[in-house]
Amino acid sequence: MFSFNQKTQVIFGENALAELPGELKRRNIDKLLLVSDPGIEKAGILAKVADTLHQAGAAFHAYTEIEVNPSDTTMTKGAEECKATGCDGVLGVGGGSPIDSAKVIAMLATNAEPLEHYIGKGADAWANAPLPILAIPTAAGTGAEVSGASMINLIEERRKVDIFGLSITPDTAICDPVLTVGLPPHLTATTGVDALTHAIESYVCNAANPVSDMFAVRAIELIANNIKPAFADGTNIAARSAMLLASSLAIIGYAGLGCVHSVAQTIGGYYNLPHGLSVSVCLPTCSEFNISTVPEKYAHIARIFGVDTGSMSLSEAARSAIIAFRQLLADLEVSDTLASLGVQTADVDTLAKQCMLDGSTPPNPRPLSEENFRELILKLLQE
């Protein structure tokens, strides 16, 4: 048995940003809280959104303090600012961090309890419906624009947690590939690998189903064919469009994640590392842990990446997917390792314990223990 639901209205295409004012009117939003980060503001993308709102006479207030890994304190402050400025709708502009923050801010703006009250309480753990939530992604990566989850960095505990629910899934996602053109090559690479990993892990996880497989396979195909062209030429709008579509598809059909994200989110929270980079570094080795459990799916992924598996055994074909992942990272000039990112051997036991608590761990196709995570992290440290 499986269920499938898609709440978000997706408006997709070049210059789709022009549809924003109409969406605000349709949803009866009088004043918008515009949630973003300093990088998006510096790149001029926020100004494009603001100009669109100004030209339509739409009222808004900008909150641009979101960090690379958005913290509980910053989200709480955003909710306070939302209420203080009389905003009745929230728009996240950027990558996963501003969009995830917009979800939390929209929820906190209508509920009295502090953020920590809702962590670990299950889906839609709040009493009141959030403010209307809109999202404009500026990177093809997290798929946060169609996701009902929000990652939160607990600063004092040095770990990432999430809240989730259908009610914080964005009501509207405006996906305009033109807004992704300015993304630097390295970020194009690492956010794109994050999108790829969402699709791969959803495809191989223990909750995969026919609907999720359909979305995951299409997302993998789009990324396999377009991530390198988008990396090589950021103005290639066809490649940018395909990557942005793939990012959304991977989450629209989301069935679950796995140990790549378990490790990446744990080290990202503990050392305050960029999410896409953490995922990229973990993808080959953590995927290798799973190939014996679902070899036929990894073999299919290898074929999508152009590997001729005709003369290979099933196990060889599955393993060739890992080789393809490593080659992709080399082609994208992602040479970082856990060691180069500052992960310390002395922290491995703590990290392994935190990995076991990560929400991505239960859907992994192969059961995981704390010792498994310890071995995986040590192996990654030796690369």
Image: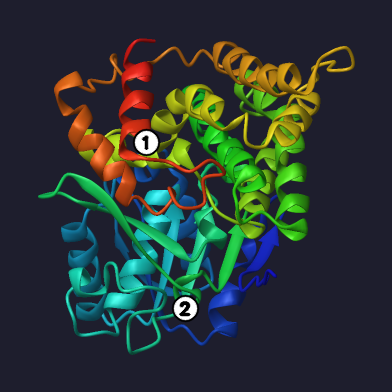
Q: How is the image coloured?
A: rainbow
Q: Nearer the viewer, residue 97 or 321?
A: 321
Residue 19 spot, x, y in % from top left? 64, 67
Crowd rating for badge 2 (residues with CA inside 10 Å; few <14, some 14–19, many 20+): many
Residue 344 spot, x, y in % from top left? 19, 21
Q: Which mark is residue 23?
A: none
Q: Is residue 50 above or below residue 336?
A: below
Q: Nearer the viewer, residue 346 or 136?
A: 346
Residue in the image at 73% along x and 16% along y: 316
As shown in the figure, which amino acid type bears the numbered disc 2? Ser
Residue occupied by mark 1: 263
Q: Is residue 294 left or right of residue 289?
A: right
Residue 209 in view, yes or no: yes
CA separation in Å, label 2 and label 1: 28 Å
Q: Secondary structure at mark 1?
A: helix
Q: Secondary structure at mark 2?
A: helix
As shown in the figure, which amino acid type bears the numbered disc 1? Val
The quadrant the N terminus occupies is: bottom right
Residue 251 spot, x, y in % from top left? 60, 54
Q: Is residue 41 left or right of residue 187?
A: left
Q: Is residue 360 left or right of residue 78?
A: right
Residue 236 in view, yes or no: no
Figure quadrant of residue 106: bottom left
Q: Is residue 301 above or below residue 1?
A: above
- Which badge, 2 or 1, comes first in the chain's sequence? 2
Q: Is residue 183 above or below residue 51?
A: above
Residue 231 spot, x, y in % from top left? 60, 23
Residue in the image at 18% along x and 81% along y: 113
Q: Which mark is residue 167?
A: 2
